Image (spheres, rainbow, N blue to C red):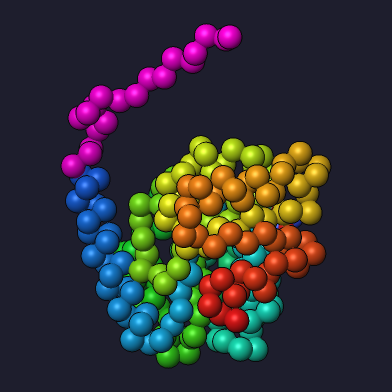
Amino acid sequence: MPDEVEVIVPDKGEVFDIELEEDLLEANRRIAEENKQLLEKHRIRAVDVMGSVGSGKTTLIEKLIELLKDKYRIAVFGGDVTTTIDAERIKKRGAKTLQINTGKECHLDANLVRKALSKIDLNEIDVLFIENVGNLICPAEFPLGTDSRVVVISVTEGPYTPLKHPYIFMEADVVVINKIDLADAMNVNVDELEAKIKKISPSAAVVKTSCKTDYGIDMVAKALGLL
Ligand SMILES: Nc1nc2c(ncn2[C@@H]2O[C@H](COP(=O)(O)OP(=O)(O)O)[C@@H](O)[C@H]2O)c(=O)[nH]1
Ligand SMILES: [Mg+2]
């Protein structure tokens, strides 16, 4: 038996800024609630799309636009640290697009989304996809006021993502396991990955997709109540 690995954890009160963070989270929740009411008033279905950099968030949104554009008027907010790469990709698909750059922040927050909502005509939109900053930790604690939260993971991350980052999965209404076309090459068993997710988040719908072959895109739309 190998020696057990020693684990270092912070003692209570040892992590800096803990009170500041509590205030911040409370303020975010309040604004998220206002966003939610504003979206409801305009009958807009909003989806927060979270996941690692490269898991396929933008590609999935592009595919969903392709599938749903004749049924809904779609807008997309693209959250990123500095670039407008994703927004330009989405714009080509014909959806109304706004980029939200967070500067150094690792997640979108309700205040930034409120600001973006003030810049578009809410009467012209039925569905809003918000691509969060590529990160599996920070976005979990910052609800934006959306109806649903989606986590996109890909088999290229290997089999451990749900176990290492359980909190974001607990927040999710829908979990998308993407790039299943690469499962064999990555030596990942997709059914086992699904079982791990179900254990962490029993109420979440889990959908397997390949944005390369379009497999499962309609199931994501169904899980979101959009089809
Ligand atoms: N093979 C394969 N590649 C994919 C799939 N989905 C996305 N990709 C590729 O993965 C890369 C990252 O995708 P992107 O949507 O930009 O990820 P994001 O950072 O989460 O927005 C791009 O090169 C996509 O073409 C998939 O299902 N299968
Ligand atoms: Mg992206």
Residue 130 in magenta stretch: no
190 up-or-down from 70: above or below: above
Residue at horizontal 23 percent and vertical 38 percent from the top:
17
**Whole-percent x, y for residue 154 in the image:** 65, 50
> In terms of image quadrants, where is residue 43?
bottom left
Res. 65 in view: yes
Image label count: 0
Tell which of 146 and 90 is nearer to you.
Answer: 146
Quadrant of the rendered image holding ligand 1: bottom right
**Whole-percent x, y for residue 146 in the image:** 40, 70
Query: Image quadrant for the C terminus?
Result: bottom right
**Whole-percent x, y for residue 110 in the image:** 34, 64
Residue at horizontal 63 percent and vertical 61 percent from the top:
207
Residue 11 in magenta stretch: yes
Query: Image quadrant for the N terminus?
Result: top right
Tell me the magenta residue range. 1-19
